Amino acid sequence: MNTTPSSSAPSILEAPRCIWPAAATLGEGTLWSQREQALYWVDILERRLHRIDPASDMRTSWNFDEEISAVAERAGGPGLIVTLRRGFALFDPAAAEVPPRYLLEPEPERTANRFNDGKCDAKGRFWGGTMDFACTAPTGALYRFDPDGRCSRHDDGFAVTNGPTWSADGRTMYFNDTVRGRVFAYDFDMATGTPSGKREWLRFARGDGLPDGMTTDAAGRLWIAHWGGACVSCHDPVSAAELCRVKLPTRHITNCAFGGPDLRTLFITSATSDLTPAQREAEPEAGGLFAVRTDATGLPAPRFGG
């Protein structure tokens, strides 16, 4: 692999601030809503959806009957498409209908699995990955859920899945095999929504954590959260070379998304899960939602087409 960066390194303009000290067990699922100018995020294991308006600091939370792991706005109706423990569902925060309305459960035979990370591609198809609840068995898979209700499985054999995200031109999809510390790249046909040509794009160094949630900026650079690594690293989209990193005051960093009126604020989630009592005491902001200003510009999150 060519390790020479083709992209310039972005600048971090300020130290990260904890804007919501939520002490989340497993913060995840960051989504910036352009139409609401607000950030949605989840605490998977506590079964909560959170929303914050950074301009007013107004915070709202919804409790669910099962794990909620990822969210995307809808283009064809009100509210959100979400992944719950068993599959894809609709939830309208304005109506606050709990439980949400299930659309599809794609793997009823894999009873020890749950859904984890996910997001929409530029054509409004929702991509979600499953994982073994115990994070050990390679039973997780990658699914594509189309606006017309069709669902297809596109990869398999993961203990924990995270991502995906896409290159700026949409021709490459990236997906994380978290437990094995690997980021895969696939050739991506945006017209058909088909990944192919899977290859290892990046392998995390031992002791630098594991690849968790990630996002792409307008220059095509990948920003990857490090579970156990206390940072978000930014990478060249072709060579995978590291361009910069955002250091956080807690070790389990889980997801990130650009937001704010100019899409230059990186919002970052974290977790208290698996921390010892001594680590919790040493990391009082663990499980918090962080914000950091950068000179990188994010991309608006695509909406689900249904």
Image (cartoon, rainbow, N blue to C red):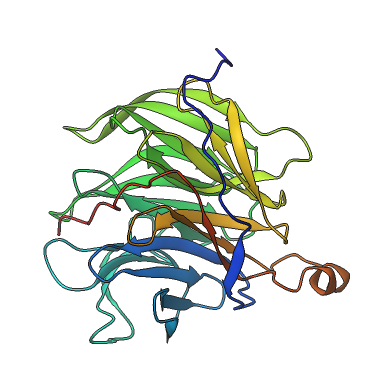
70 versus 19 height, above or below? above
Q: Which residue sits at x=59%, y=78%? A: 22
Name, please, the residue furthest toward the right: 278
Q: Which residue sits at x=50%, y=31%? A: 184
Across and down, in percent, residue 276 comes to 83, 68
Across and down, in percent, residue 62 comes to 41, 84
Q: Which residue sits at x=72%, y=32%? A: 205
Judge by depth and name the residue closer to the eye, 99 or 267: 267
Left or right: residue 207 compared with residue 27? right
* Quadrant holding the N terminus: top right
User: Looking at the rendering, which quadrant does residue 186 occupy?
Assistant: top left
Across and down, in percent, residue 233 comes to 60, 41
Judge by depth and name the residue closer to the eye, 63 or 288: 288
Left or right: residue 271 compared with residue 130? right
Name, please, the residue furthest toward the front: 13
Q: Which residue sits at x=71%, y=45%? A: 209
* Quadrant holding the C terminus: bottom left
Name, please, the residue furthest toward the top: 2
Q: Is residue 110 visible?
A: no
Left or right: residue 72 compared with residue 41? left
Across and down, in percent, residue 280 comes to 79, 72
Q: Is residue 251 visible?
A: yes
